[in-house]
Amino acid sequence: MNKTVTELQQEFRQLRLAETAEELPKLLRQAEQSSWTYQEFLEQLTAFELKKREAKSVEKRLKCARFPYIKSLSEFDIGTQQALTKRKLTQLEELQWLEQHYNLILLGPPGVGKTFLAVGLGLEAINKGFHVSFVTMGELLQLLKTQEYTHKSQVQLKRIQSADLVIIDDLMYMAMDQREANLFFQLINHLYEKSSIILTSNKSPNQWSDLMGDQGITTAILDRLLHRVEVVHMDGESYRMKNRQQLFEAEM
């Protein structure tokens, strides 16, 4: 018995192929106009469904990443950086370091593009099928300290711990007490050789022990972070200061 297009659409929805169900009338018209074979029609049908599923998957991974903003690497001004060449940026963009569980440490003063570069690499990873989690150091410490009694913190930490790439922004912007340093070590130890980590900081690793207050914990953290790592020293004028907006126009 021949079924109507509407009946076929309903069956597609029952199979959880809602996007393809909506597109079915258009695909049937194209098949008739182009004289597709049965195989060609099925190829078009499955290609459409796979494309829609991948788009939804990217959208979901993007939402879970919790980026502070969306900026791609194509928007990154490599001309402002002396230490980061176009060749090095291309190598980072290829993400072989992520596949090999290398870490990246982006060092430099405020406003030179550390977070911008980290977000751009995170977006590239998402588009290539990786799961990414972005968190500031302040947010991370709050999650670690409240995980025992806050369900929201438990959920967010679980996402961080299961991510392929974890981006920790503004590392060591303020001192940690011993409990915070211990909790941070436990997270780094969990991620070690399972995930890649991007850290942004305006302080070099040899200054971190001053802010953690415990040489033993600092050494243990650095041992894991620096085992496989690429350190990028970023310089130049602060982008925020260079492009600051003013309320009043300068008087002549």
Image (spheres, rainbow, N blue to C red):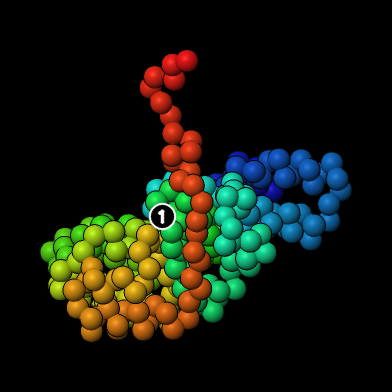
Q: Is residue 249 above or below residue 105?
A: above
Residue position marked by numbered label 1 in the rendering: 109
Residue 197 place in picture, x, y as percent: 42, 70
Measuring from the top left, give residue 130's x and y in whole percent: 51, 66
Q: Which residue occupies the foreground of this view, 191 or 155? A: 191
Where residue 71 sits in the image (x, y, percent)?
52, 47
At horizontal 83% and vertical 52% (from top left) the residue drawn is 36
Q: Is residue 7 above or below residue 177?
A: above
Q: Nearer the viewer, residue 169 or 215?
A: 215
Q: Does residue 47 sit above or below 95 in this rendering? A: above
| Mark 1 secondary-structure assignment | loop
Q: Can you name the residue that lies furthest to the right here?
A: 35
Instruction: Tell me, yes or no, if residue 198 can be seen here.
Output: no
> Residue placed farthest to the left in the image?
149
Disc 1 marks which amino acid? Answer: Pro
Residue at image x 35%, y 64%?
203
Q: Residue at x 17, y 65 (%)?
A: 145
The furthest residue to the front: 252
Residue 90's quadrant in the figure? bottom right
Q: Position of residue 137 (x, y in %)?
A: 29, 60
Residue 23 visible within the image: yes
How many tags in the picture? 1
Residue at 15% of width from left, 69% of height from top? Answer: 177
Left or right position of 63 against 117 = left
- 144 vs 1, left or right, is left
